[in-house]
Amino acid sequence: MSVYLDCASTTPTEPSVAKIMRRFVERDYGNAASPIHDYGTFARMAVDHARGQVAKLVKVRRDDVIFTSGATEANNLALLGLRKHGRQTGRRHLICSTIEHKAVLEPLEALSQSGFAMTLVPAGSDGRISVTELRKALRPDTLLVSTMQVNNETGIIQPLTEIAEVLADHSAFWHVDAAQGFGKEFDSITHPRIDMISISGHKIYGPKGIGALITRKRHGEPPPLKPLMYGGDQEQGLRPGTLPVPLIAGLGEAARCALRNHAERLARVRNIRNQALSALTQLDPIINGDQTHCLPHVINLSLPGIPSATIIRALAKTIAISSTSACTSHTSTPSYVLHAMGRTEAQSASAVRLSWCHLTDDIDWEAVVTILKELKTQAKS
């Protein structure tokens, strides 16, 4: 069995998360909307407890956390949920970057097709959004700015603190897609200027199918969102449906572990990163993005002349890796993120992403390098 190095796509489940989920599947299976008996009361208590565990990571109130099916739904709620407010106020200008996830780009594209104007801010060769260009893009009628915390393909941490300074005196709502960085990079995401944050459970060793939109009140008022679905008043009327208590409890436990075990996890992933760079350097790869701003869990590199698919297949019995975002991996098109960073078509077409975590098994880097050296020899012949 190969070693799993695709944690940026989805992470393994923390053992304590699996344990608490089993409890709410097998024993404490009440409906949180039915606190008329002990089963329902305990389910509601579990949901409220998990809400507080998630809120603690970004220093907000527990009632600022709205549970969703994941970051994609949270992104859609944050972005499309402002449509009515934008039309009512005449503010129909949107800003995001060229390296955002499709779960942000596509909802914004839907808004642009219904009368909103969108400005795409470029990223530099370092993989970071241009703060200077974002400042230039701001207009009096800018309704929303959406930026990611950490890029999902390169692992590059974005300049949120600098963006907060740019937006300090502007009324635009600011949404941050924190699917990749939540529970891993803490400082920037706690900035009080951020109005909305999207997170996903399966990126932080929790279950799939659960996430949250975290909102911050401004002058005592939450962002003026409207629901995308109707049929109940759960989650402050923004997200109807029976709450999945086992998934929510699992997300809460994952958030608790992220905060409690951060230093220990960081030491482990940094050790893996050092081993990886030490081994891979002899291949003379192109490392994509400024590594001084990279999460220690990720390396995105190119070996020009060797197609990404060839690299992935050759290494399949040794390590399991990917080339682009999981949401675009079904296409053969080179990464639009790397293209936006100025990489050539050849560099983008040969890029692969290695991503690991504290639960990752030891890796035979010597075997990995031997296989890649053989591929380079074949490419030259």
Image: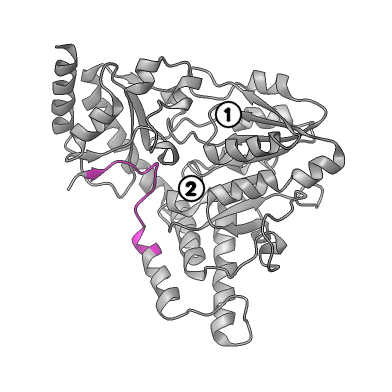
| 306 vs 38, nearest the viewer | 306
Which residue sits at x=43%, y=52%? 202
Which residue shows up at 39% across the image and 34% down it? 331
Identify the residue at horizontal 54%, vertical 43% (top origin): 178
Distance Cα–Cα, label 1 vs label 2:
17 Å
Residue 234 is situated, as x and y percent measured from the top left of the image, at 67, 67
> In the image, is 272 to the left or to the right of 134?
left
Range covered by the magenta-colored residues: 3-17
Quadrant assignment for the C terminus: top left
Residue 56 in which image quadrant = bottom right
Q: Position of residue 77 (x, y in %)?
A: 65, 50
Q: Could you tell me how many numbered marks the image carries?
A: 2
Q: Amino acid at mark 2?
A: Gly
Secondary structure at numbered mark 2: loop
Query: Looking at this rendering, what residue extends furthest in the bottom direction?
Result: 37
Q: Amino acid at mark 1?
A: Pro
Q: Secondary structure at mark 1?
A: loop
Q: In this view of the protein, can residue 275 be seen by the observer?
A: no
The numbered dot on residue 183 is 2
Is residue 233 or residue 38 the one in the foreground?
233
Image-based side of 318 in relation to 225, left or right: left
Q: Is residue 375 visible?
A: yes
Residue furthest to the right = 89
Whole-percent x, y for residue 121 in the image: 62, 23
Numbered tag placed on residue 159 in the rendering: 1
**Residue 356, quarter of picture:** top left
